[in-house]
Amino acid sequence: MDLLIKNGRLVLAHEIVMADLLIECGKISRIEESINLNSIPRIDAEGAFVMAAGIDPHVHLSLPTPKGYSSDDFHSGSQAALAGGTTCFIDFVTPEKGENLKTAFLKRKAEVRHCYCDFAFHMSIVEWRDEIPDEMEVCVNELGITSFKTYLAYQKTVGISFELLEKTMNAAKNLNVSVTIHAELGNEIDQMRSEAIAAGQIENSFHAKTRPDFTEYKAVEKVIELVKKTQCETYIVHVSTAESLKKIQQANQDGIPIYAETCPQYFTFNDSVYAKEKSQSNGFVMSPPIRSEENRKGILNGIIQKQVLAIGTDHCPFSTQQKNAADNFSEIPNGAGGIQHRLALVHAAFVHTNQLSMIEFSKVISAQAAQFFRLENKGEIRIDFDADLVILKPVSESIGQQKLYSKSDIDIYANEMIYAKPAIVIKGGYIVFQNDQLSEKPPRGKYIHRK
Ligand code: URP
Ligand code: ZN
């Protein structure tokens, strides 16, 4: 698709320029002070910021759990993403135990229907078998997967031990790809949860109390040792404590290839959310939990200090019905949505408050994830890159005033104020969102085969 964007303030990798941008065949083909081509459809951006669209490196669409699937499938999840200025995301393949990784990948890929965003997968390693290194090689060399996900939490289901993590890291390092880690001490947490339930401590505040800060930062500490040993590029997902972030930053400065992701929930809320009445606090049951105010400020500060490689969402909403069906905190399906709000929330917390520049904003919501996860030709406004763009407009409204595309009836961010949102979203040169409306027939997204 060809399109001309006139008069925008283009947020490039190192500078902001007032210029025109030409899209040809879905790619950015020219950036010049003035481009005049009457034969091509045009948008007058009138001094608005034009940025690379968002890339969310951490989403769970149609995630199977014992309490049913997470609310959004690839259709509703991608609609919500586009409405929020995100045109590409990375979801997960979670194989059954004993299942060949390629088989699991093919099954997962077949579940993707009517997805309007480009997408990739992290492959989860949930066990160790002799064949796993060979299957990982197939993932990398045949299936286009360059990141493996491991869980140290959830020991009763997908979680693995530090020993298996080390094997996974060695195999990934041999293949020159990365490992992403949900870093929480699963066994310690399981024990605390069992003790709490046995003692009748069933309220949602015990979800947080049975996952205290140390269960994250001690896991991070052990992971750092393994990264040092294996030299495997490692990305810690949804970092929620200030101490974890400090340790990751220190290790990174010492030359250890470890990087942090955090999510908007960890700089937006504090653990007072668990004091709300059950029906309200159920939405905040996620892992890691929402932390203390001190941690919230530590995460905010870490983002300002550029200690975070990417801000993902961990988008994994459930319905009120699914959340309310549980008798105690340990039965509530874990997760919350956020894919539609990520750009606006990050903008409100950091750009609106003059703590990040537009260039730095663009890096944490798009460019750095694209580089780390090898999403070729994405994440920046650059010649020959995909024309996945967002034109922002200033607003002053609460999130709850917007039309929401998630299928979940819970939005933990409904009361949050935002100060910018997408006026127009462009994907592969097509206008996919404009005038607060999704286009009627956005083109389908494609699977990104990473190298
Ligand atoms: O509570 C969460 N985060 N649910 C989604 C799955 C995960 O642990 O990332
Ligand atoms: Zn997750």
Image (cartoon, rainbow, N blue to C red):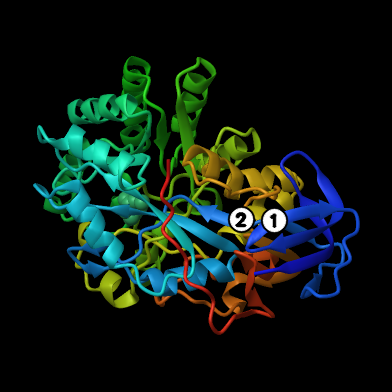
Q: Which residue bears the numbered disc 1?
A: 28
- Name the image quarter holding residue 256: top left
Whole-percent x and y of residue 67? 20, 67
Whole-percent x and y of residue 196? 19, 48
Location of residue 280 with respect to 169 vertically, above or below: below
- Name the image quarter holding residue 367: top right
Q: Which residue bears the numbered disc 2?
A: 386
Q: Is mark 2 within 8 Å of ligand 2?
A: no
Q: Residue at x 78, y 54 (%)?
A: 30
Q: Secondary structure at mark 1?
A: strand
Q: Secondary structure at mark 2?
A: loop
Q: Residue at x 49, y 44 (%)?
A: 262
Task: Please rate how many residues cluster around mark 1, counting C-alpha atoms within 10 Å: few if below 14, some from 14 to 19, many from 20.
Answer: many
| Quadrant containing the N terminus in the rendered view | bottom right
Q: Which mark is residue 178?
A: none
Q: Is residue 386 visible?
A: yes
Q: Is residue 394 left or right of residue 315?
A: right
Whole-percent x and y of residue 92? 32, 53
Front residue of 256/119: it is: 119
| Quadrant containing the C terminus in the rendered view | top left
Q: Is residue 363 left or right of residue 396?
A: left
Q: Amino acid at mark 2?
A: Asp
Number of marks in picture: 2
Looking at the image, which residue sits at the far bottom? 440
Q: Amino acid at mark 1?
A: Ile
Whole-percent x and y of residue 368? 57, 41
Instruction: Report how far apart the C-alphas of labels 2 and 1 lie in the structure.
Output: 6 Å
**Residues under numbered marks 2 and 1 in contact, where contact means CB atoms less than 8 Å apart:** yes
Q: Residue at x 16, y 56 (%)?
A: 200
